[in-house]
Image (spheres, grey):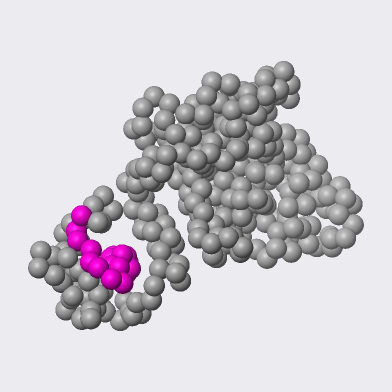
């Protein structure tokens, strides 16, 4: 096992190794038997609890978890096994692990199911975006899906407000995110050292979450989604289309690759019309220019033209002009007076 797996969350570790669903089920059982509060068990106890799993397999997966940095083990035939609890000194320290588990586990679980070949999923760290006092979520997921018996595509923008304690004010911060998101969540991490979360406070936040439609999650161990509990699901909200669009455009300033891939996914619709297929890899372009050429080409309508302003805020003007000339030279597009682009014919 390589050391590059150390310090990954459980979800990242599984994704990094591309485990089969059968192997992951066994691994999840093994890891689930290690006390989540930092207490110790033993390999013997884990093997006894998993009668349908060979002892050699239990040993293998304990070694896998140890080498991945998630557990520590003792010596001997019945070695002790305990989780390596991570220390989170402040709110900011929670973001990386929570973002990783949202991207690898939350997004993959029903009813979200964003991690499928025909769907779209990107998770961004958005703390620090300049959107006013309470308008910048800590983590944002952009997910797209298709449904077999409904036409079109459905886009979700899910925001997460993170708090290192049970803090009801975070719920109202999350509520403010619904001006530019379809779903909003509050995630609270009650530190393990504080014992069980205060039931009265949990109940108060849960009731307010249900009243407002904000989702409420307790994340006991930020690096292991299996220890998270969704107290209240988030209701779907329909923000003003312009607000949703502008927020996604703002996300593109953090990650232009995400914005380009989202546009490509949204365009991949057989009802948009047929155009001549182009193998951009045969044009002798760099990877970046291949992507830009494909993005620009697919934005040109079957009938009509596109000018520079269509790409403003997404692709730099000089890149549009440069790629335009390359595509013209290859006979892939025609250039109109004034710089507009259209398909040949």
> Does the magenta run of residues contain 304?
yes
Q: Is residue 207 above or below residue 73?
A: above
> Does the magenta run of residues contain 308?
yes
- The answer, for residue 280, to whether it is visible in the render is yes
User: Residue drawn at (19%, 58%), measured in percent from left and top?
Assistant: 308
Q: Residue 231: x percent and y percent?
A: 69, 33
User: Residue drawn at (70%, 40%), measured in percent from left and top?
Assistant: 227
Residue that protrudes farthest toward the left in the picture:
337
Q: Closer to the camera, 332 or 108?
A: 332
Question: In terms of secondary structure, what is the magenta stretch mainly?
Answer: helix
Q: Closer to the camera, 338 or 289?
A: 338
Q: Is residue 147 above or below residue 224?
A: below
Which image quarter is the N terminus in? bottom right
Please provide the residue range marked out in magenta. 290-309
Q: Residue 189: x percent and y percent?
A: 61, 30
User: Residue drawn at (50%, 60%), measured in percent from left and top?
Assistant: 152
- The answer, for residue 220, to whether it is visible in the render is no
Q: Residue 123: x percent and y percent?
A: 48, 48
For residue 140, side relative to residue 86 (left or right) = left
For residue 293, side relative to residue 170 (left or right) = left
Q: Residue 259: x percent and y percent?
A: 37, 54
Residue that protrudes farthest toward the front in the picture:
303
User: How many numbered discs, if any?
Assistant: 0
Which image quarter is the C terminus in? bottom left
User: Residue drawn at (55%, 26%), measured in percent from left and top?
Assistant: 171
């Amino acid at each position: 096992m390589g050391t590059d797996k150390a310090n990954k969350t459980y979800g990242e570790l599984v994704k990094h190794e591309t485990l089969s669903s059968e192997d992951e089920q066994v691994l999840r059982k093994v890891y689930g038997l290690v006390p989540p509060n930092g207490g110790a068990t033993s390999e013997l106890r884990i093997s006894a609890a998993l009668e349908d799993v060979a002892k050699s397999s239990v040993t293998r997966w304990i070694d896998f978890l140890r080498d991945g940095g998630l557990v520590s083990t003792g010596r001997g035939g019945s070695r002790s096994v305990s989780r390596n609890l991570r220390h989170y000194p402040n709110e900011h320290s929670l973001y990386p692990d929570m973002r990783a588990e949202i991207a690898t586990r939350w997004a993959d679980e029903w009813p979200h199911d964003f991690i499928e070949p025909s769907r779209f999923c990107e998770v961004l760290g958005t703390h620090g975006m300049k959107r006013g006092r309470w308008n910048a979520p800590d983590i944002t997921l952009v997910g797209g899906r298709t449904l077999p018996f409904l036409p079109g595509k459905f886009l979700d923008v899910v925001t997460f407000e993170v708090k290192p304690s049970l803090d009801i004010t975070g719920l109202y911060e999350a509520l403010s995110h619904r001006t530019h998101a379809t779903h909003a969540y509050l995630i609270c991490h009650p530190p393990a050292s504080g014992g069980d979360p205060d039931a009265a406070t949990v109940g108060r936040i849960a009731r307010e979450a249900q009243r407002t439609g904000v989702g409420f999650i307790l994340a006991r161990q930020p690096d292991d989604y299996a220890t998270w509990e969704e107290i209240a699901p988030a209701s779907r909200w329909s923000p003003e289309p312009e607000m949703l669009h502008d927020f996604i455009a703002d996300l593109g300033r953090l990650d232009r690759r995400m914005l380009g891939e989202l546009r490509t996914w949204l365009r991949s619709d057989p009802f948009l019309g047929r155009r001549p297929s182009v193998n951009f890899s045969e044009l002798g372009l760099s990877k970046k220019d291949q992507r830009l050429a494909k993005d620009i080409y697919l934005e040109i309508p079957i009938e009509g033209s596109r000018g520079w302003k269509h790409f403003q805020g997404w692709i730099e003007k000089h890149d549009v002009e440069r790629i335009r000339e390359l595509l013209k030279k290859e006979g892939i597009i025609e250039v109109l007076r004034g710089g507009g682009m259209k398909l040949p014919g």
